[in-house]
Image (spheres, helix red, strand yellow):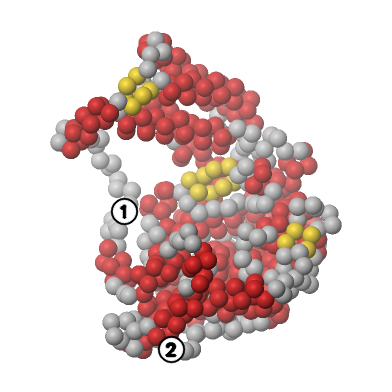
Amino acid sequence: MSPFTDQLISLTDLSNRVKPLDGQAMAAEMESLSKSLDSFQQKDNDETVSVSQPVMDAADDLVDAYQSWQTFYEGYHPDFNWWVLDLAKETGSKLRAWKDGLKVDESQTEKLSKRVASDSIDLPSPAETFVFGEAYPPIETWSQREATWMPSIVRRFTRRSRDREKKMAQLPQWKDELAALKLDGKPFEEWSLDDQVDWHLLTAEVETRLGRKRIEESGEKLAPATSSVEKDLSGTPVGRERIELELRRQFIDHSPEELIELAEQEYAIVRSEMVRVAQDMGLGDDWKAAVERMKNHHVAPGQQPVLIGEMADQSVEWLRKRDWITVPPFADYCWRMIMMTPERQKVNPFFTGGEVISVSFPTSEMSPSDKRQSLRGNNIGYARATVHHELIPGHHLQMYSNERYQPHRRTMSTPFWLEGLAVYWELKLYDDGFARTPEERMGMLVWRAHRCARIIFSLNFHLARFSPDQCVDFLVDNVGFERRNATAEVRRSIGPSYPPLYQAAYMLGALQIRQLHREMVLSGEMTEREFHDSIMEAGILPIAMLRQLLKQEPLQRDEPPRWKFN
């Protein structure tokens, strides 16, 4: 397309983001790219160049990739700001000017289309290694799981509609028709187990939406709660009736008080382990002093992406060596990384992830105090738990699997599977020795304590027992978070963006899966790999439903499998 495109592609390659940055070398690379752009534009004498539509699309992609590359480093990496930033801005202006000098010629587009159709274009040589691996995709397994009736009904219910009021008005009819439904003329008892599970999921979804509407229309609302310290820290408790409704939606047979008690018991276990680690660090029983020391074990500004890349590779190697779960080569290959904006860090002071891991770390525009707290809050010990939580075997692998197995179940998503499974892996990897030093052990334990604390403060808040300030104090006093980060966590937890059980679901879902592991693996019914692969292939489900599938126990229409777990 242009002589400098190879330089641009090499510069903006996403895999470079987890490699150490050499600011001086990158500056030299930028100078070379800038000269290539100057030379090309002088040759064309600033005339408009006619191109086909695919070439224009490629030019847009190159400009976008360049802007993404600059955004990733600017403000986050001191060497980039020192060596490269001014050059990057200048070169970006030249690149945009080059793109603006292109115009689409329909005749060239048509000509190119004919060449493609006639196979007269030389294609690049195939890669030596097929990135998808052997036997991909598993068509036979996929087709067997899709040979059911309910997925199409679920998709019909969950498809998007612009008329929200009309969809709400149809809920009673959906409830009645589901109650009378027969598949292929067969009674419920003769359906496949997958169809039985999906029927219960959809029925629970309909009943929950009707319940939410009933609660909303009753007018019995609790007053909003606002912090006396932070002006933008506020939320509205949903009350007991709504919490119990949402627990039924998850097929959980516990009261809010029982779950709070369970969290307090789990927290006591974690606290005793934190004391043991503090003793290993030579600090006696002072776990808070150990947490403070651990927070100072962080990489320098700009180095966090490299640390994340290393830890991501280590977690995948750990899983494969133990044959715990299938990690498809393409899943390991295709995750990406961006840096979290300073504004978003006010709500998410730590990593968020999935196919794209968003890294929270100090920026040049932060105050010195915020920079210190961000460094301490994203230390090496914390990262030992959060990297694999967000990538593999956590959210990235989960979402990768959800695209391929039972994808209709994503539309009725549950955090008890999504977050609970990621926290379950934190517990399992910790127990297996994934944390290599006392500081890393303490980092993973702080996160475990945090998951317990989320149950306690979020349920107490929605029962109108805790104020926003009490929630923040609880995290600072019982977990050891920096106050800035604790405030951001509470802001995220009690705000309108997350459902009321979301924060509690992290640890509660993990405890459910841990008990299911005891029932299925420690009993000898399944191997580790069979258990974990089966969870992925079942799709995103409330854990009580996942339990029915793994045990292959048929369901009854009138008896939802509500689970009182240990």
Q: Which mark is residue 213?
A: none
Q: How many marks?
A: 2
Q: Residue at x 48, y 37 (%)?
A: 16
Q: Quadrant of residue 89?
A: top right
Q: Residue at x 57, y 27 (%)?
A: 23
Q: Residue at x 37, y 53 (%)?
A: 329
Q: Amino acid at mark 2?
A: Gln
Residue 257 place in picture, x, y as percent: 71, 80
Residue 142 place in picture, x, y as percent: 31, 66
For residue 107, side relative to residue 100 (left or right): left
Q: Amino acid at mark 1?
A: Gly
Residue 234 place in picture, x, y as percent: 75, 59
For residue 278, side relative to residue 51 (left or right): right
Q: Residue at x 28, y 41 (%)?
A: 127
Mark 2 element type = loop
Residue receiving disc 1:
133
Q: In the rendered image of this protein, does residue 4 appear above or below residue 381?
A: above
Q: CA distance from mark 2 to mark 1?
A: 41 Å
Mark 1 element type = loop
N-term mark: 2 or 1: 1
Residue receiving disc 2:
556
How many residues crowd mark 1 within 10 Å: few (<14), some (14–19), many (20+)? few
Q: In the rendered image of this protein, does residue 171 appear above or below residue 321?
A: below
> Can residue 400 be seen here?
yes
Q: Quadrant of residue 303?
A: top right
Residue in front for this viewpoint, 245 or 37: 245
Residue in front for this viewpoint, 390 or 227: 227
> Can residue 529 be seen here?
no
